[in-house]
Amino acid sequence: MKILAIDSSGLVASVAVISDDNLLGEFTMNYKKTHSQTLLPMLDDMAKMIDLDLSTLDAIAVAGGPGSFTGLRIGSATAKGLALALDKPLISVPTVDALAYNLCGHRDLVCPLMDARRNQTYTGLYCFVGNQFQIIKEQCAVDIGAILAEINTIGRSVVFLGDGVPVFKDYIKENIKVDYTFAPAHMNKQRAGAVAALASEYYAEGKLQDAKDHKPEYLRLSQAERERLEKENGPD
């Protein structure tokens, strides 16, 4: 089984290919360039380096949201275009789930934090029993205080990761009541390798989509849509 994975849901752009239990290649960049500039060149470079024949792929996987609205659209369009051109199924992997999967096997509660602006975060709660992935709280968009309150209630040690960590680190330190750590640099952002690994489990379970049916999962309205509604509804 060979899967190409794409993640452009956040600040990081990342592509990867796995074949069964082997990560054949991964290209990840987090440096001052837009995903429209980096994603396809990264994919092309990686494919050349590992002599990838795209026709041998079994599926295309993509981080399906939530995340950056523009980033999700770019990733979605790229994945759909490839899947349609190659006549391959598409696997949509929840962004927050894939981020948590970076820490597969970790002994603590895993809490990804993506900055959703306005003091909100895209987050969820996860744990691993050995390498078995368990979802305690499905991905959601909530106030940072709400997810910390839930963690405090659970009472387990927790590890945080994601681009929301720098944004909320001081708040976490002031309000967390359990032991906590922050994931190191090589594990604390989105990686297409994690999307691919989780997608392989989805593939085995038959969780496939026809590419034409795929839509990103935004979890909340865009800023432009919120501002339009506010204008339409007027002051309370």
Image: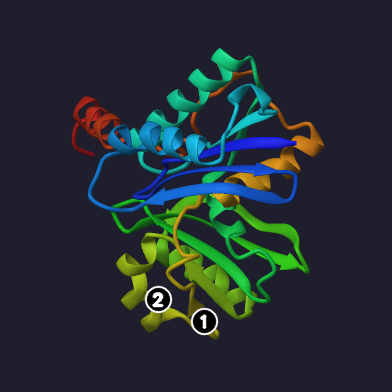
How far is the residue under mark 1 from the one under mark 2?
A: 9 Å
Residue 172 tag number: 2
Residue at image coords 45%, 48%: 27
Sequence-wise, which precedes: disc 1 or disc 2?
2
Given residues 134 and 222, the one toward you in this image is 134
* Residue 57, position as x, y percentages in the image: 66, 28
Helix, strand or loop under label 1:
strand
* Picture coordinates of residue 208, whole percent (x, y): 70, 28
Residue placed under numbered mark 1 in the picture: 180
Residue density around tag 1, few if under 14, some if 14–19, many if 20 or more, within 10 Å: some
Q: Position of residue 236 (x, y in %)?
A: 23, 39
Q: Is residue 221 visible?
A: no
Are the residues flagged by discs 1 and 2 in contact, CB closer than 8 Å? yes
Q: Quadrant of residue 204?
A: top right
Crowding at mark 2 (Cα within 10 Å: few <14, some 14-19, many 20+): some
Q: Which of these two is toward me, 83 or 98?
A: 83
Residue 210: x and y in percent read 64, 18
